[in-house]
Image (cartoon, helix red, strand yellow):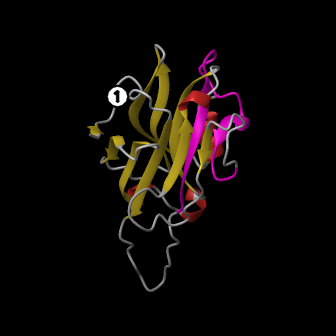
Amino acid sequence: MSVNLQKGQKVDLTKDHAGLKTLVVGLGWDEAPKKFSLFSKREDIDCDASAILINAQTGKLNGPIDVVYYGQLMHRSAAVRHCGDNLTGEGDGDDEQIIVELDKVPADFSKIVFVVTIYQARERKQQFGMIKNAFIRIVNADTGEELCKYNLSENYEGKTAMIFGEVYRYNGEWKFGAIGEPTTDNGIADIAARFQ
């Protein structure tokens, strides 16, 4: 049975689900209704999900090689892979998915942080106030069972990126933490720099 999380809550993944090996991290969002005028045309909002692998020793990102995103779909360890870029967020369910094979994550990484940025947010004058129904969910890839879900329900007017949550190791087990921290970063390079 899926657990609905609130901001700041954590849940055990492997301790509560023996044999859990592979996660599907699904991220979704909908564009809020557009305000039309005769003189303006608003482009679709292109949200991009990414995974940032954090070094266990330093607690930081080693560099761009450890960021999985639309321009680098697989981590060098093959433990984390992005399933592709959704340019509009249209449709129901997950808009983008990232697969994590827990047993393949090298021991020198302690955490995988999941973020969503808006492509060219500043140039297109777009922000998370134009997004609704945003969520992150963790699914057992082998059974299809949703383990937990975190719906972002706050007002994120003026924010251009979001740290959704993290999967991390603790005492030999994997856990998930719901973060929901908005930022004003402009793209994956900006938000990744926060972890260096």
Q: Give the range drawn in magenta.
A: 46-71
Residue for point 58% across, 53% down: 83
Image quadrant in which the N terminus is located: top left
| Frontmost residue, 39 versus 150 | 150
Residue 153 % position (x, y): 30, 48
**Residue 60 is covered by the magenta coloring:** yes
Q: Can residue 158 be seen in this view?
A: no
Q: Is mark 1 on a helix, strand or loop?
A: strand
| Frontmost residue, 124 versus 109 | 109
Residue for point 45% across, 32% down: 20
Residue 25 % position (x, y): 47, 44
Name which quarter of the figure residue 56 lies in. top right
Q: What residue type is labelled 1?
A: Val
Name which quarter of the figure residue 51 lies in. top right
Count of labels in the image: 1
Residue 61 % position (x, y): 65, 28
| Frontmost residue, 189 versus 175 | 175
Residue for point 63% across, 17% down: 58
Q: Can residue 106 be seen in this view?
A: yes
**Residue 192 is covered by the magenta coloring:** no
Residue 119 % position (x, y): 58, 57
Q: Would residue 180 be found to the left or right of residue 190 on screen?
A: left
Residue for point 63% across, 48% down: 69
Vertical order, 110 against 141 (above or below) = above
Kindly give the residue lying farthest to the bottom in the view shown: 38
| Frontmost residue, 57 versus 147 | 147
Vertical order, 26 against 44 (above or below) = above
What residue does disc 1 label?
11
Q: Would residue 68 be found to the left or right of residue 87 on screen?
A: right
